[in-house]
Image (tube, rainbow, N blue to C red):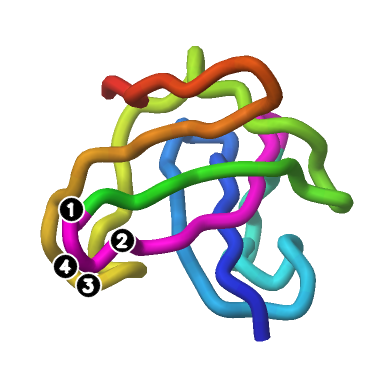
């Protein structure tokens, strides 16, 4: 199992531990805004987001409306997106 995330058609970012990104979809959902991988940093309590989904492509955070923290640990954390040449905090 791998730590992956998606952004569904409602702009909800969902975390999970799955083999493939499509396994994070619930019945009737779509994933037009991509996804990627995540890692939790114990010392900083940040969630690092990186990469892209082979099922749905690169994440588009412009459509992000909320984070499903229950799919992680139920607590809100800073989100940091790492991509080649860019490190930025993700704002909702």
Residue underneath mark 2: 41
Residue underneath mark 3: 73
Q: CA distance from mark 1 to mark 4?
A: 17 Å
Discs 2, 1 touching: Cβ within 8 Å = yes
**Front in this rendered view, residue 23 or 83:** 83
Q: Which mark is residue 74?
A: 4
Which segment is the magenta one? 32-45
Which badge, 2 or 4, comes first in the chain's sequence? 2
Q: Residues within 10 Å of mark 4 (few under 14, many from 20)?
A: few
Q: Residue at x 12, y 61 (%)?
A: 75
Discs 3, 4 touching: Cβ within 8 Å = yes
Which badge, 1 or 3, comes first in the chain's sequence? 1
Q: CA distance from mark 2 to mark 4?
A: 16 Å
Q: Is residue 78 left or right of residue 86?
A: left
1 vs 4, front mark? 1
2 vs 4, front mark? 2
């Amino acid at each position: 199992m791998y730590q992956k995330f998606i952004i569904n058609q409602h702009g909800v970012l969902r975390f999970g531990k799955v083999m493939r990104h499509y396994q994070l979809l619930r019945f009737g959902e779509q994933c037009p805004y991509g996804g990627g991988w995540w890692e939790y940093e114990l010392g900083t309590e940040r969630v690092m987001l990186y990469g892209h989904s082979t099922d749905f492509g690169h994440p588009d955070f412009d459509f992000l409306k909320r984070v499903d923290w229950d799919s992680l640990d139920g607590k809100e954390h800073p989100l940091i997106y790492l991509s080649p040449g860019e490190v930025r905090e993700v704002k909702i």
